[in-house]
Structures are given as C-alpha cells and as structure tokens.
Image (cartoon, rainbow, N blue to C red):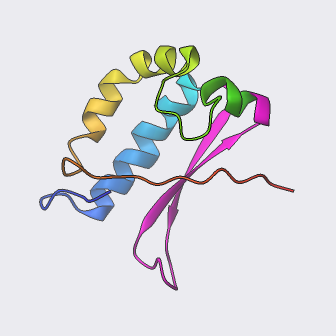
Amino acid sequence: MTLKPDVTMKQFIDFYVNKYIPEFEKNYPGVKEFLLSGDRGEKKNQIGVIDYFESVAVRDKYYPIENDTTMSAAVKVAGEKMKAINEDAGKFFLPGSTRVYTDWLIK
C-alpha cells in the first residue's frame, strides 16, 4: 500500500499499532495481528502485516475459500464493527493501493 504524501511512516505505524491492531483483535476473536518493519534486505524500509489465527478452523471461519472476494458471515460482522477504524485507516493510503497475501502454516 502506498502512503499519502502528507503521511509519515511514523504516523502510520503509531496509528496502526496503537489504534488499529487493538480494534482488529477485539473484533476478530482468535486472531492476533502483528505489524512488521523491514530492517535489512530486499524489503528494508517497507512494512508488512501478519495475522496469526489460533487455528486453521479460525482462519476458515473468516476466510473459508482461498482468494475468494465473497465475505464470510464472520467477516461481515467484524467488518461492520471495524467500519470507523477502517475509515480512519483510509486517511493514510492513496486510493487504489493494493495488498498481497500468503497463508503460512507454522510447523
């Protein structure tokens, strides 16, 4: 995602860690979210987010079908609760910013 020109990385990180993540975790039971910051290597000075689902069953409750854009009932409920914070988050990014994802299993 691309930050708006008047937004610093520090402002975004402060918002995300102190406001967005607590709201996210409250509304997505069974999920923890972590903000990552690239320190060295190819992704230096870039950020990422990892959502840790306590089980595959919890993941599937929210996202039952890989790469499906249809929202599950659980995501619809959580999304309604997240509406205000998502609008606040939108103040940080340029329109059309995209995200990519990978589902990782910890072994």
Q: State which region is magenta.
A: 29-57
Q: Could you say which is closer to the camera, residue 22 or residue 64?
A: 64
Check the image and report above or below for 77 versus 92: above
Residue 55 seen by the camera? no
In which image quadrant can residue 47 be found? Answer: bottom left
Q: Is residue 42 left or right of residue 93?
A: right
Q: Which residue is drawn at 26% across and 35% down?
A: 88
Q: Residue at x 54, y 41 (%)?
A: 67
Check the image and report above or below for 28 versus 42: above
In which image quadrant can residue 106 be found? Answer: bottom right
Q: In this view, does 105 lie to the left or right of 24?
A: right
Q: Residue farthest to the left?
A: 6
Quarter in which the C terminus is drawn: bottom right
Check the image and report above or below for 92 versus 42: above
Q: Where is residue 92 in the image (x, y as percent from the top left)?
A: 23, 49
Residue 85 seen by the camera? yes
